[in-house]
Image (spheres, grey):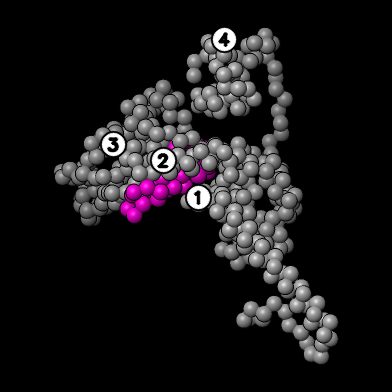
Amino acid sequence: MKEGAQEYIVKPCHPQEISMLVSRILKLKKLQTENVILRKKISRNYIHHDIITKNPRMQEILSLTQDIASLRSTVLICGESGTGKELVARAIHYSGARAEKPFVSVSCAALTETLLESELFGHEKGSFTGAEGQTKGKFELADGGTIFLDEIGDVSPKLQADLLRVLQEKRFYRVGGTEEISVDVRVIAATNKNLPEEVKAGRFRDDLYYRLNVIEIRIPPLRERREDIPLLAEHFVQRIASELGKDIGGISGDALNILIDYDWPGNVRELENVIERAIVTSRNGTLAASDFTWLTQRRKPVQEWDVPDVPLSELERRAIIAVLERKHGNVKEAATSLGIDRSTLYDKLKRYEITH
């Protein structure tokens, strides 16, 4: 059994018992083979640089990553936390001419201004307390490749100015240094904030925003691509069960329905964590609906809409404005959410004098 035998028979045994046992093992092997073939087919159709999707909007994004992969233009990836912004950045890097060069990721929200400055640009010995030697920053380490600046919306005003200079001139100084350093780095930035609103509020430099936003990619949240949930869930079950050494073969249809109905405020990252919790606590070979009952208790009760006492046309105008704000001014996506044609929405924008 340790060497991989499926079953064993205690002598003396009946030939019919052997026949039934062999038949059962052959069926199991057939199912395993079919499973492997199906998983390979899914991988071929829906996986691209670790991004698993069959959503049309995500497919457009993946196609765009191929088109822009070998360009030097900066890219701004927008989307809620947990949607996979870094995976898209990696897809861009590893699809292009810089694939053999470094991909360096920096979380701009995780460090204070002083530490982030040193992290990005490096420092010289003695430039601050604890600086015992010369250290290269992430921009130097990414030379020839790509630097991914995650949560760029949290960068301080001083560092925004420094980043603008690097983007424009491809040169910078280490902290405490006098030697100017030149680099060839492609910058991909990401944010979960509404940067145009941050610019309006004076918290983000408009010149830096326009410099970053040469190519913009907006990743839809998981609740807007529910067809991806079964694919992602199966993928996480396979990977996490293997990592934890648990014999979990899959996920039931009822369990999938619970996952599909949930709104996923934490997006793909939350789904991954939920699957891990279910695998850890499950005592069956398949994840069932009972492994996710706690998830249904998280749902917020649906609040009744307090309809204001205004004309119907005013309600329509407010609804259009709200959807446009939620879609960051994207008319195509707003029209889809409202269930109308884009041309119809343009007519209504003109009628209600709504700017977007």
Question: Can residue 110 be seen by looking at this rendering?
Answer: no
Q: Which residue is mark 2?
A: 67
- CA separation in Å, label 4 and label 2: 37 Å
- CA separation in Å, label 3 and label 4: 41 Å
- CA separation in Å, label 3 and label 2: 22 Å
Q: Is residue 78 magenta?
A: yes
Per the image, label 2 sits on a secondary structure element best described as helix
Mark 4 or mark 1, which is nearer the start of the sequence?
1
Q: Residue at x 36, y 52 (%)?
A: 99
Q: Amino acid at mark 2?
A: Asp
Percent x, y of residue 218: 49, 35
Residue mark closest to the camera, 3 vs 4: 4
Q: In terms of depth relative to the viewer, which is nearer, 282 or 37?
A: 37
Q: Is 210 drawn above or below residue 5 in the view shown?
A: above
Q: Residue at x 68, y 14 (%)?
A: 308
- The magenta-colored residue range is 77-104
Q: Is 189 drawn above or below residue 6 in the view shown?
A: above
Residue mark closest to the camera, 3 vs 2: 2
Q: Which residue is mark 3?
A: 167
Mark 4 or mark 3, which is nearer the start of the sequence?
3
Is 355 situated left or right of 97 in this image?
right
Mark 2 or mark 3, which is nearer the start of the sequence?
2
Image quadrant in which you'd find residue 182: top left
Mark 2 or mark 4, which is nearer the start of the sequence?
2
Q: Which residue is mark 4?
A: 351
